[in-house]
Amino acid sequence: MSKHTWDPDRYLTYADERGRPFVELLSRIDAHVVRDVLDLGCGPGNLTTLLAERWPAAEVTGVDSSPEMIERARAEHGGRVTYEVADLRTWAPEEPVDVLISNATLQWVPGHLDLLPRLLAMVKPGGWFAFQVPGNFDAPSHRITHALGGEPPYAELAGDVAWPASYDAATYLRALGALGCEVDAWETTYLHVLHGEDPVFDWISGTGARPALQALEADPALRASYEEELKRRLRAAYPASDIGVLMPFRRIFVVARVAG
């Protein structure tokens, strides 16, 4: 997947807000007798543990391409869950699993719609494939981040970084339906109320803005300038109010039952 590194501490700044979509996705998987569960893009493992709680008799495996994330997962959430560093584009389990879940990961894989047949092959007939991806890439936070990265003097380092992207719910439904699945697809827009001096920057610096910020690490002064200007623009786009900073966040959910 993406070649940039991840900071588990920064990613977990809004752990509750990031975790809610996972919980809602998990609640729509109607699987009962489950022997093995796979979490692709498990991150720091704080949500993968919920899979072990949901299906206590199952063997649960978490996979992520980030060594930093897997190190944190093993240190804090090992035991019931096995964690492995691997790239989901090339890795596969030894045997198909009953439940495959992927939370906020596929948007980092360019052309991931073409990857769906391969992911379905990881699931047993009659099993479940569920994923959630952000659907807010036209939001001000993303538009501002992309635009600033393409402006001088930042463009030389950040102008060609890989940005995350996703499709709408109907596109995923049609693609998986054509592959023989029974599909439930929907979207939800969360209204997050954030607090702090620059909460939107704090949020996106752990995810969507990460590629540009890492690219600019080669020039610390330029990165500091980029951060300052990005914060300024985000404050204008997401003004503070008496209740905090309101950040709408649209997410796409898909739960598919693989043909038996």
Image: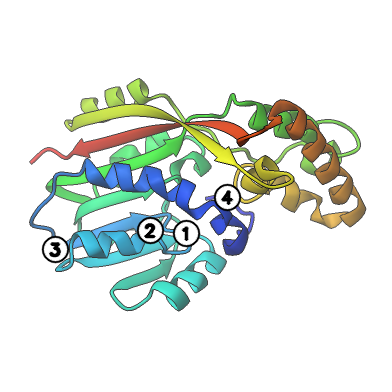
Instruction: Look at discs 2 and 3 and give the one toward the viewer.
Output: 2
For label 4, the residue is: 2
Q: Estimate the spatial distance between the alpha carbons at disc 1 and disc 2, rounded to whole Å.
A: 8 Å
Amino acid residing under circle 1 = Gly
Q: Quadrant of residue 81?
A: bottom left
The tag earlier along the polypeptide, 2 or 4, is 4
Task: Give the secondary structure at mark 4.
Answer: loop
Sooner in the amino-acid sequence: mark 1 or mark 3: 3
**Disc 2: which residue:** 47
Residue 43 image label = 1
Whether residue 46 is situated above or below residue 130 in the rendered picture: below
Q: Label 1: few (<14), some or many (≥20) within 10 Å?
A: many
Residue 138 image position (x, y, % from top left): 59, 24
Mark 2 is surrounded, within 10 Å at the Cα level, by few (under 14), some (14 to 19) or many (20 or more) other residues, namely many
- The answer to whether residue 237 is left or right of residue 250 is right
Question: Which colour assignment does the render follow?
Answer: rainbow
Q: Amino acid at mark 3?
A: Arg
Q: Are marks 4 and 3 in contact (CB under 8 Å)?
A: no
- Above or below, 44 relative to 212: below
Residue toward you, 47 or 163:
47
> Residue at left 91%, top 37%?
153
Image height of 42 relative to 237, above or below: below
Q: Residues within 10 Å of mark 3 (few under 14, many from 20)?
A: some
What whole-number distance in Å separates the C-alpha atoms at marks 4 and 3?
Answer: 31 Å
Q: CA distance from mark 2 to mark 4?
A: 21 Å
- Which residue carries the number 3 mark? 35
Element type at marker 1?
A: loop
Element class at badge 3: loop
